[in-house]
Amino acid sequence: MSSHDLSEAVQFTAPALACDSHFHVFGPAGQYPYGSELRYDPPHAPLEDYLALARHLGIERYVFVQPSAYGRDNTCMLDAMRVVGDKCRGIVDIDENAPEAELARLHALGVRGVRVNVRPIKPAEPGFSKTLLPRVERLAARCAEIGWQLDFLLPGWLTSEMMPVFHGLRLPFTVAHLGMNLARDGVQAPGFQQLLDLLRHGAGYCRVKLTGLYRISQDPEFKDIAPMVQALVEAAPHRIIWGSDYPHLSFGQHSSVRLFNLLGEHVPDPAARRLILADNPAELFGFQ
């Protein structure tokens, strides 16, 4: 965590039971094995640093997301979840054919979903969505059975290519980082309009995560994101959730407090913010 985070003022009061719906923890190098495909230099981002930040922001519930650096070894995240207990949920990365007993073990620890994670800067490869279909279809069937969800992190072009699949899914699923639609393309860009259409006219299962704004913005003040956030909230205020994306990985220079404060700027209505930060994640992740 950058040292300036905790000295920075929080500009609005989080609603009771506010939830960070997307963040990662990392143990010290060598404590947990990394996967074979490292997209970034994994930081040391221990649970206690994250919890200090969460207290500063007024966050009381937490959704851990398995980072790509650990591949399908979820041990680091599960160890942290055991410490936090029933105030947290987790999204794992597992093989779609993992044994039933493993799913039951993970469920008991608070896991409620599986990631489908494609490198967000992967260059366009038309037809690539077909290679994901066997995994997505198998996971969708298994997750629907046990009350889990699917969690998609995809480059923008692939989010668009997956739209027919998204319209056909019959279980809750999330799309991270505003679907990786680039802010420079604007609200009217076809990919972003498809996402709005999915929220407005889809079967009601899609949730969009307000996360990773630095991945899609070109403005140091993130002003180019505001129209996109406002369009999403207008389209489906009950289907938007927020996550810090801590510790920001390749974008570690960004302040978590500043990113939280942006939600206050982009969504000035406290009732809408309560939906995004508290009510929507409580419903989606099954918090009591």
Image (cartoon, rainbow, N blue to C red):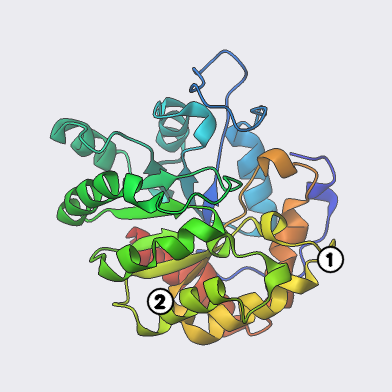
Image mark for residue 221: 1
- Residue 207: x and y, percent? 42, 68
- Residue 233, compared with residue 208, is above or below; it is below
SS for callout 1: loop
Evaluate whether residue 257 shows in this view: yes
Quarter of the N terminus within the rendering: top right
**Which numbered circle lies on residue 198?**
2
Q: Residue 283: image x %, image y %?
A: 35, 68
Residue 287 in view (yes/no): no
The amino acid pointed to by label 2 is Leu
List the single residue furthest toward the top. Answer: 30
Dot placed on the residue nearer the N-terminal end, 1 or 2: 2
How far separated are the C-alphas under marks 1 and 2?
A: 28 Å
42 sits to left or right of 118:
right
x and y, in percent, of residue 105 in the image: 23, 34
Residue at figure coordinates x 40%, y 76% from the top left:
198
Residue 8, compared with residue 263, is above or below; it is above
Which mark, residue 1?
A: none
Q: For mark 2, does the 10 Å Cα neighbourhood hold few (<14), some (14 to 19), or many (20 or more) residues?
A: many
Front-most of 286 and 220? 220
Q: Amino acid at mark 1?
A: Glu
Instruction: Say few, some or many: other residues with alpha carbon within 10 Å of mark 1 (under 14 / 14 to 19 / 20 or more).
Output: few
* Left or right of residue 254: residue 179: left
